[in-house]
Image: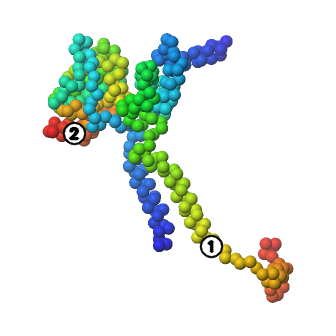
Amino acid sequence: MRALKFIIPLAVFVGLVAFFAVGLTRDPREVPSPFIGKPAPAFTLQQLHDANATFDPAQMRGKVWLLNVWASWCVSCRVEHPLLVEMSRKNLVPIIGLNYKDQRDDGKQWLDKFGNPYTLSVFDVEGKVGIDYGVYGVPETFVIDKQGVIRYKQIGPITPEALDKTLVPLIRKLEAA
Amino acid sequence: MKALLAALMIALSTSAFAQADEVANPDPAVEQRLKDLGEELRCLVCQNQTIADSNAPLALDLRNQIRTQVKQGKSDDEIRDYMTARYGDFVLYKPPFKATTAILWIGPFALVALGLLVFLFVIRRRRPPPAAAAVPQERRAQIEALLDESGRAETPRGPPRKDPRRS
C-alpha cells in the first residue's frame, strides 16, 4: 500500500511521456480535412487551356483519380512537380489539376516550362472551388475514389515517402475495390 | 519634415491592405456582423489570427464570402456551419462541446475537484479531530500552576542549563 505513493506519480509521468512522445511527432499546423469519407464537392469550371470546355468531377466516376491544387506563384509546387510528372509518365493514376487563384497565361507558361502531368487543369481564378474543398494552402492533393468520395488529402507537397507509403497503396486498394 | 512624411506613409499603408475587401457603400449592420463572426473564426494560414484581423489572401476571400452570405440573409449558425463543413472544428475559436472535446472543456474543473479532494484527504490524515472535553475548574488551577512552574525553571532538577542559542 505504501508503494502506491510512488507508483501513482510514476504512472502519471509515464502516461505524460507517452502523450508527448506521440504528440511531438505531429505537425500542429496541419488542419485535418473534414472531407475524408465524404463526397467530393461538385463544381463546373472552365479548363485552363480551353476556356470553352468545362470540367465536372462527376465525369471521373468509375475511376480513381487525384485532384492536385497548384499555382504558378507557388514555390512548394515546384518541389512536388517532378514527382507528378514521373507519376503521369508511369500512368499511375489520372491527375486533374486545379489552378488556384492564378492568371491563365501564367499557369499555361508554368506548365510549358516545368511539364504538364495533368490530364487537364481547371481554372479556379477566384479560389471559390478551393474554399469548397477546404483548401488553405498550396499545394494540396485529394485522392478520390470511383464513387467520387474523397479518401485522403495530402497537405503540402507530395514527398517520395508519402507517395510510396501512403498514396500508392491507397490508390491500389481503391482501384481493386 | 522627413519624420512627418514617414509617419504619414505608415499611417496610410494599412488602408492599402484593406483595399481589396472594401465595399463601395459599406452597410454598417453587415460589416458589424462580419466583424463579429470574423473574430470568432481562425485564419488557417496564420492560425494565430482571426479571419477579421488576418491579411492572408485566404482570409480576404473568406471575409468576402461571409459578407456575401450575410447579405443573402444567412444566420450566424449557418455561416459557422459553412466554415466547419470545409475546414473542420479547428476554424472555430470556441470549440464545440462534443464527445471529442469533452475532456478539453471539463478537464480543468475535474482537475481542480481532484486537487481539492486530495487536499482534504491529506488534511484529514494529519490532524485527527481533537476529542477534548471541557476541563473542570479544579484541574484548571492545577494545570495553570504546573505551566507557571515549567516557565520559570529550564529543567525540573539541577541548575538551569546555558541557553545554547546565546554563545
- Residue visible at 34% across and 32% down in the picture: A156
x%, y% of residue A8? 46, 64
The quarter of the picture where residue A133 lies is top left
Q: Does B96 appear above or below B159?
A: above
What quarter of the picture does the C terminus of chain A occupy? top left
In-front residue for pair B132/B44: B132
Q: Does B127 appear above or below B146?
A: above
x%, y% of residue B158? 82, 87
Q: Are the residues under badges 2 and 1 in a single subunit?
A: no
Mark identifier at residue A170: 2
Kind of element beneath mark 2: helix
x%, y% of residue A121? 25, 20
Q: Please name the amino acid that badge 1 sits on.
A: Pro
In-front residue for pair B129/A55: B129
Count residues near mark 2 (Cα–Cα under 10 Å), then give few for <14, some for 14-19, many for 20+: some
- Residue visible at 36% across and 31% down in the picture: B86
Chain ID at mark 2: A
Kind of element beneath mark 1: loop
**Relative to residue A54, is residue A126 drawn left or right?**
right
Residue, disc 1: B128
In-front residue for pair A103/B140: B140
Residue B147 visible, this angle = yes
Mark 2 vs mark 1: give the one in front: 1
Residue A83 visible, this angle = no
